[in-house]
Image (cartoon, rainbow, N blue to C red):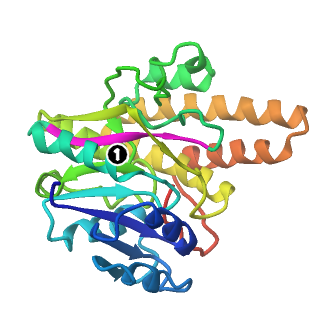
Amino acid sequence: MHDVELVLVSYRSAHQIAGLLEGLPPSLPVVVVDNAGNSDGVREVVEARPAGRYVDSGGGKGFARAANAGARTSTHEFVVFGNPDSRPSMEVLEAIVADVAEDPTCAASAATMVGVDGRVELGVGGWEPTVRRALVHSAGLHKVLPRAGLYARPEPGERIDVDWTTGACMAVRRSTFLELGAFDEDFYVYNEDMAFGRAARERGMHEKLRTDLLVPHAAGGSGAPSLEMLRLRGAAMSRYLSRHHGALTHRLLTTALAGGYAVRAAQRKVMRQEALAEQHWAYVKGVTTGRASVAGRVVMSR
């Protein structure tokens, strides 16, 4: 077995983390970086394990900063980033670590997340945004052209090349992760994984998405309420585009995305699906303003 530590970022996620750890060997090193000051007793959960350690982030640090703190304070050769509401097996963790260990050009290897309905989640990986990809996504054409949009939703076992992978269950060599700049801490939550994929490509490296390794994931099982998260998602995308694309491309991409989600919101409104309409409008607000209001609350993860 490789020298690996599991890194979990928590925001009042003690119950989720307890469930995750129940399925993993007690000897597995685990660090929990807590964004909520042990308000839910997560410290006791992790420190009850022989190789568990607790890091208090100080609160309000977001996912990228907290995940980086876990990696930077680790003494292990490899780390696996996981979401508290994911349920990877030890076999999955060993497989994605082996990918990174055996290929020096592999910056990260990630398992494929499946939702409570058993379907692969949209966004387990994806591609660098372009105007064409944004239009495909906004129009909903990614459902019939699954490799033409922004986010990947592969079939189990399908071979697929992506530009970035989700950090919900992702293995990295710790030294390589830090050399690449770790997760970009300018992103509070979302798009830090896209930015890391870009940094890897700029160094001639790649990321691997293991569609043969399926991990149950209760998406949205931790973090802030959905409206806040949708606005954060839109704001993070706008920030990413402004940093890595020219002003004109940024405007075209955000306009395409905002237009698509505005149409979706209107459709849901007509269908009297008020909650979904509000979620789409929240994304529009985030992507058009580049700002995310979280009502003074701390948000931590996907």
* Side (left or right) of 219 relative to 77: right
Tell me which amino acid carries mark 1: Val
Rendered view: 186 above or below 98: below
Residue under numbered circle 1? 92
Q: Judge left or right: residue 163 versus residue 273.
A: left
Question: Between residues 197 and 263, which one lies in front from this camera angle?
Answer: 197
The question of residue 112 being in magenta is answered with yes
Q: Residue at x 26, y 48 (%)?
A: 94
Q: Is residue 249 visible?
A: yes
**Which residue, as the protein is rendered here, is positioned at the far top?**
144
Instruction: Indicate whether 58 appears above or below 118.
Output: below
Q: Main secondary structure of the magenta part?
A: strand
Q: Closer to the camera, 183 or 89?
A: 89
Residue range corresponding to the magenta coloring? 106-115
Q: Position of residue 217 (x, y in %)?
A: 54, 49
Number of numbered discs on residues? 1
In the rendered image, residue 288 lying in the magenta stretch gets the answer no
Res 288 → quadrant: top right
Up-down: is 130 above or below 178?
Answer: above
Looking at the picture, how far across and down is residue 27, in whole percent?
28, 70
* Residue 245 in sight from this viewpoint: no
Secondary structure of the residue carrying numbered label 1: helix
